[in-house]
Image (cartoon, rainbow, N blue to C red):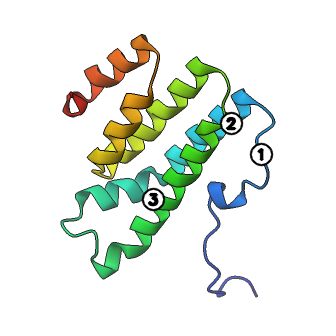
Amino acid sequence: MGWFSKDKRKDVWDEANGEPAGDIEAAKLIREICRSAADSAEKVGSAADRTARKIKGEVERYERAARAAMEIAMKISDGLLRDAAVRQIVELCLKADNLTTAQTLYRAIQAKSIRDEVLRDFPQLQP
């Protein structure tokens, strides 16, 4: 009976075994990771204390998702596609109120159009 088992929930970044087949698949996977982890990021961002026991699982889930997305993004060879994927990760970090990581990732975006769009949407990233 699997209904009552205490198995840890499987997330898309945990199930992603191997490398995506190409840049487009990698960008799609990053988008899916960011959407799946958005709820955890919002809980982390709205919590006053990240070390609080009741959100510890959400913090770990958000951090695993962000780390997996960043690792995949580093392997995207197309610059514009990589920048668009990094934008998704920046948004995830901002939902978690992780401004330091978001600013670091923002600086990694090369395409001026994407940088301008991110800055327009998230003025708190202003250097």
Looking at the rendered structure, the number of numbered marks drawn on it comes to 3
Residue 49, image quadrant: bottom left
N-term mark: 3 or 2: 2
Count neighbours of disc 2 (C-alpha within 10 A) and say few if under 14, some if 14 to 19, many if 20 or more: many
Determine the residue positioned at 46% across, 15% down: 111
Instruction: Identify which amino acid the numbered label 1 is placed on.
Output: Glu
Of the numbered discs 1 and 2, the one sitting upstream in the chain is 1
- Disc sitting over residue 19 in the figure: 1
Kind of residue sitting beneath label 3: Tyr
Check the image and report above or below for 85 versus 16.
Answer: above
User: Are discs 3 and 2 less than 8 Å apart at CB?
Assistant: no
Q: Which residue is rendered at x = 65% and y = 21% of the image?
A: 78
Q: Quadrant of the N terminus?
A: bottom right
Q: Is residue 81 above or below residue 50?
A: above
Any mark on residue 26, and which? 2
**SS label for mark 2:** helix
Marks 2 and 1: in contact by CB < 8 Å? yes
Q: Residues within 10 Å of mark 1 (few under 14, many from 20)?
A: few
Q: Amino acid at mark 2?
A: Ala
